[in-house]
Amino acid sequence: MKKYQKIDNVFKFDEKYRKILGLNEPFDTFKNIQWEGTEKVDGTNIRIHWNGYEIDFAGRTDKSIIPPHLLEYLIKTFKTKEMEYVFEQMFGEKEVYLFGEGCGPKIQADGQKYFNEPTFVLFDVNVDGYDLTRQKVNLIAMQLGLNAVPVLFHGTLEEAINWVSTPSLSFVGKCEHEIEGLVLVPANDLQLYDKHGKMLKCKLKYEDVKRLKGDNYENN
């Protein structure tokens, strides 16, 4: 089963991960382009897979253990004849991956702050090897009755850092706690790739920005 790409931190740290040395490449090169930021959700990575005939799912890796209460939710939500019919009508025999976070009680430290029950929050969709635009991801979430990460930011990376430095309440679930940060991709559906062929995408965490604002940042 296809794995979701690792999202790199926008910041470059020293060897002991104590001091921010600047922006990682290639993000520093593209810091002044327009970026789009969705809310970073603190959960456990879940992959929903449609092979053209049936639905299956897994954690971040094929060997990852899904918490029993989340597994029960995934089975009830996706392993039904009704959901298979919907997937068949929407995607036919195309191979589809829904990438998202499992959230809720007993899932990471703050899982209960999002939802009272286990829930899947969609953040990306890949169809036959191609990542869909945010607009199409949101449409699929609506058609399947799923939660999706909201778009919260547009601007440069410096503007994103300033935005995260004064975080708002989460826009996912109960909206009772501050956001963890942003996941950023080039705006306007511009798909850029690094030298390894990986799509340009980075995470910007509030905890890191607090460290940055604490004068540990050395701008190269």
Image (spheres, helix red, strand yellow):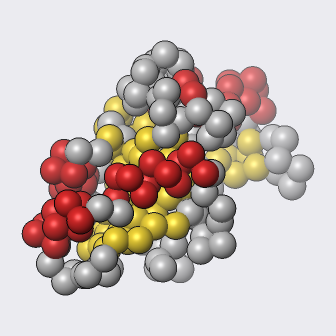
Q: Residue at x 50, y 58 (%)?
A: 46
Residue 3 place in picture, x, y as percent: 51, 73
Residue 39 place in picture, x, y as percent: 43, 37
Residue 78 place in picture, x, y as percent: 34, 59
Residue 40 place in picture, x, y as percent: 49, 40
Q: Residue at x 49, y 27 (%)?
A: 116
Based on the displayed image, in which of its 4 quarters is residue 156 positioned?
A: top left
How many marks are shown on the rendered structure?
A: 0
Extreme left residue here?
Answer: 89
Extreme right residue here?
Answer: 16
Q: Residue at x 49, y 16 (%)?
A: 176
Query: Residue 87, relative to residue 162: is it above or below?
Result: below
The answer, for residue 69, to whether it is visible in the render is yes
Query: Residue 79, relative to residue 11: is it above or below?
Result: below
The answer, for residue 159, to whether it is visible in the render is no
Based on the displayed image, in which of its 4 quarters is residue 83 positioned?
A: bottom left
